[in-house]
Image: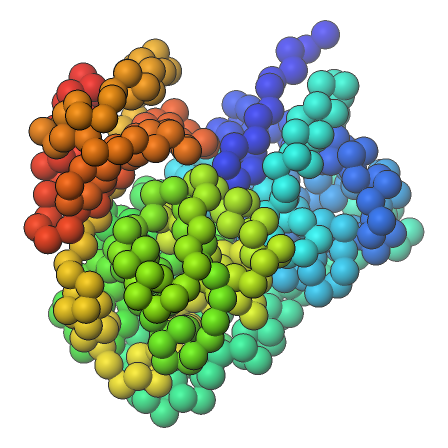
């Protein structure tokens, strides 16, 4: 019997290297296991929706997955072109479907692809359901697609659906594009060759970068972090732009570039949106942050009487609270933000357009809005370094973190408290550093925030050296 490669879901779905573990056989196995687990779902007769992004073979992997669901008699709506991950969530919710599937590896390098599951409410799948799928996979050996889409189409079990058109019509009803047009904002948008390309152009004039399909993503991972955004930053520095918007490969995450061409870290991006929603628009609700979220949020929430909830890293933890409680905004450090009245889900396109609406309605620049925060709460600085390493060194680092005690020093800072909620967070007098392993790649993530003065890079580099990782 051929060897069956293991499949393990991480913080946001299953991701693996194409042609190694991410194969047609494994995509079919995961799809069949999912179909079997959900066969008794109360909404299964309504069907499911499958979308895919612009990655290499994503369309073909999506068709293979669709065949598996159709073979189990499950009505399957398959995107007729590439779509964003939030589109899958939106259609799943609006069409009252049992769940949604998105073929994407999000921000991972081009060698990867993935399989995300979206629950019936339009957000990340509950982890308890993912465990059931992993258990069912143990009973499924090699499965191969026979590419019989035509048969399922004729039988009516498979149906193509224009997800892109659906999302565009929805977005037009949620964002005040008229006020954005009247403000005459000059906006640059970097699609990073991903699934968000050409959507914003449907509503307002934008200068779009990387708005074509390129499965190698220009040799950079489609991740909206500062090191990958020199092109759009230089464009804005040398031009007259009010705003730069960047979305990742499946357009659920966002980065903002200010009018000076400077990258706005994800922590400030989150807080400025909160200030717009609660301060300018007067909306109410709880605030949810991931474990690596900024302490600036706590100061803001304390001052304005908003309840702040902290959860482990992974948007599935934020989604769970958003569907159960009255949440105004929920966000993770990596640029994923969910907004009340939209979806319990990240959506980079929606949030980028909301930023444009914020500038239009307030009449202020990103720099002015950021300065207002600094003047009110003091300056906060944030940074993150990802370290690729071996499993042996990764595990040794995580174990060493467990040996620290309050009063010890890390990176030259005296530890005043330790929180092991997700990885280990060491707080000191003017900030904190967190060490945790990635849920989708073989690396360690080091996060740091300081207030008053920017010591983040110094602290991060010292910590990495202390763990013998440099």
Q: Report the side of 251 relative to 461 (left or right).
A: right
Residue beneath the point at 41% across and 33% down: 421
Confirm whether residue 102 shows in the render.
no
Instruction: Indicate whether 387 appears above or below 309.
Output: above
Q: In terms of depth relative to the viewer, which is nearer, 165 or 362?
A: 362
Q: Report the side of 343 relative to 462 (left or right).
A: right
Number of numbered discs on residues: 0
Instruction: Indicate whether 467 appears above or below 187.
Output: above
Residue beneath the point at 52% across and 40% down: 12
Q: Position of residue 355 (x, y in %)?
A: 36, 72
Q: Position of residue 371 (x, y in %)?
A: 16, 70
Q: Farthest right residue?
A: 155
Q: Position of residue 309 (x, y in %)?
A: 44, 51
Asked which quadrant contains residue 240, the reply is bottom left
Residue beneath the point at 35% across and 62% down: 301
Instruction: Indicate whether 336 appears above or below 396.
Output: below
The type of colouring in the image is rainbow
Residue beneath the point at 30% across and 31% down: 418
The quadrant of the rendering that contains the N terminus is top right
The quadrant of the rendering that contains the C terminus is top left
Q: Position of residue 30 (x, y in %)?
A: 68, 31
Confirm whether residue 116 shows in the render.
yes
């Amino acid at each position: 019997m051929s060897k069956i490669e293991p499949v393990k879901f991480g913080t946001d779905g299953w991701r693996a290297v194409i042609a190694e573990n991410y194969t047609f056989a494994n995509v079919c196995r995961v799809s069949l296991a999912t179909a079997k687990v959900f066969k008794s779902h109360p909404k299964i007769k309504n069907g499911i929706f499958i979308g895919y992004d612009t990655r290499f073979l994503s369309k073909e992997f999506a068709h293979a997955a669709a065949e598996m669901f159709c073979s189990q008699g499950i009505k399957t709506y398959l995107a007729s072109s590439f779509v964003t991950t939030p589109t899958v969530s939106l259609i799943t919710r609006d069409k009252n479907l049992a769940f949604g599937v998105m073929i994407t590896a999000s921000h991972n390098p081009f060698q990867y692809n993935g399989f995300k599951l979206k629950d019936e409410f339009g957000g990340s799948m509950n982890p308890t359901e993912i465990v059931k799928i992993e258990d069912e996979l143990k009973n499924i050996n090699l499965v191969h697609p026979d590419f019989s889409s035509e048969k399922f189409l004729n039988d009516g079990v498979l149906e193509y659906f224009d997800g892109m058109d659906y999302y565009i019509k929805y977005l037009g009803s949620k964002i005040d594009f008229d006020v954005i047009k009247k403000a005459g904002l000059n906006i640059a948008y970097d699609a990073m060759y991903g699934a968000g390309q050409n959507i914003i152009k449907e509503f307002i004039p934008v200068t779009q970068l990387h708005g074509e399909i390129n499965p190698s993503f220009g040799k950079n991972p489609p991740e909206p972090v500062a090191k990958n955004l020199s092109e759009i930053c230089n464009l804005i520095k040398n031009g007259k732009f009010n705003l730069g918007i960047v979305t990742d490969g499946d357009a659920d995450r966002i980065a903002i570039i200010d009018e000076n061409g400077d990258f706005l870290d994800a922590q400030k991006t989150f807080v400025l949106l909160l200030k717009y929603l609660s301060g300018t628009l007067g909306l109410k609700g709880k605030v949810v942050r991931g474990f690596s979220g900024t302490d600036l949020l706590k100061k803001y929430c304390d001052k304005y009487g908003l309840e702040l909830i902290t959860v482990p890293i992974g948007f599935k933890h934020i989604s769970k609270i958003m569907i159960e409680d009255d949440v105004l905004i929920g966000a993770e450090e990596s640029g994923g933000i969910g907004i009340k009245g939209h979806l319990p889900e990240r959506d980079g396109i929606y949030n980028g357009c909301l930023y444009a609406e914020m500038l239009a309605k307030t009449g202020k620049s990103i720099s002015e809005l950021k300065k207002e925060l600094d003047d009110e709460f003091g300056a906060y600085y944030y940074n993150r370094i990802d370290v690729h390493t071996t499993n042996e060194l990764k595990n040794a680092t995580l174990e060493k973190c467990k040996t620290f005690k309050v009063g010890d020093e890390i990176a030259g800072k005296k530890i005043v408290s330790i929180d092991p909620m997700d990885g280990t967070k060491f707080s000191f007098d003017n900030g904190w550093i967190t060490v945790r392993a990635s849920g989708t790649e073989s690396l360690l993530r080091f996060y740091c925030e300081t207030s008053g003065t920017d010591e983040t890079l110094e602290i991060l580099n010292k910590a990495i050296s202390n763990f013998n990782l440099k």
